[in-house]
Image (tube, grey):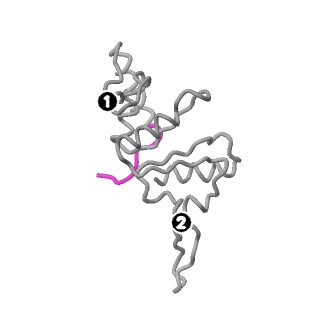
Amino acid sequence: MSNRRPSLRTKAAQSVAVSETLQAQPGSSDQYLSALGVYGFGAFEPIILATLVTADPLLLIGASGTGKTYLLNSLSEALNLDHRHYNASLISFDDLVGFPYPHPDGTGVRFLETPATLWNAQSVLIDEFSRSKPEQQNRLFLLVQAL
């Protein structure tokens, strides 16, 4: 069995399968999310639950005020996850990953963690992604793929 993560094409096919399943079951409700105190996302519940089960990144796109941040913060709280919430347009990349520090023997680099680093978090929300500079977006995309 391969340890490689599924390709984007594979993930897209899985998302389509979940979406088709959702369409095949009209009237599905947000029974699991509502049990966690999160309401109004019933149409997306299968996708959100699949993301929680597989621990894959979830990209939410929508107009301001539609509850994207509320959804993720509420889920993290309800599931008692070690949650980090970052504003992509304000955070320094070094704050997210730590500060590079060379090994004394010169064999490589390690990163000194700060209270803001995301490595031990169980839930990470990178908010306002579209408002960050393109260079920051590229670094964040690489980071999301590494998680």
Q: Position of residue 139 (x, y in %)?
A: 61, 53
- Answer above or below: position of 111 versus 3: below
For label 1, the crowd category at 10 Å Cα-Cα, with few meaning under 14, some 14 to 19 and many 20 or more, is few
Instruction: Give the residues in magenta.
Output: 1-10
**Residue drawn 58% across and 71% down?**
100
Q: Which mark is residue 114?
A: 2
- Determine the image quadrant of residue 93: bottom right
Q: How many marks?
A: 2
Looking at the rendered structure, the kind of residue marked 1 is Ala
Q: Which sits in the foreground, 94 or 32? A: 32
Q: Position of residue 45 (x, y in %)?
A: 38, 27
For label 2, the crowd category at 10 Å Cα-Cα, with few meaning under 14, some 14 to 19 and many 20 or more, is few
**Residue drawn 40% across and 43% down?**
77
Residue at mark 2 to residue at mark 1: CA–CA distance: 35 Å
Pick out the residue farthest to the left. Answer: 1
- Answer above or below: position of 65 versus 98: above
Q: Which sits in the foreground, 123 or 77? A: 77
Pick out the residue farthest to the bottom. Answer: 105
Looking at the rendered structure, the secondary structure element under dot 1 is helix
User: Which residue is disc 1 drawn over?
Assistant: 35
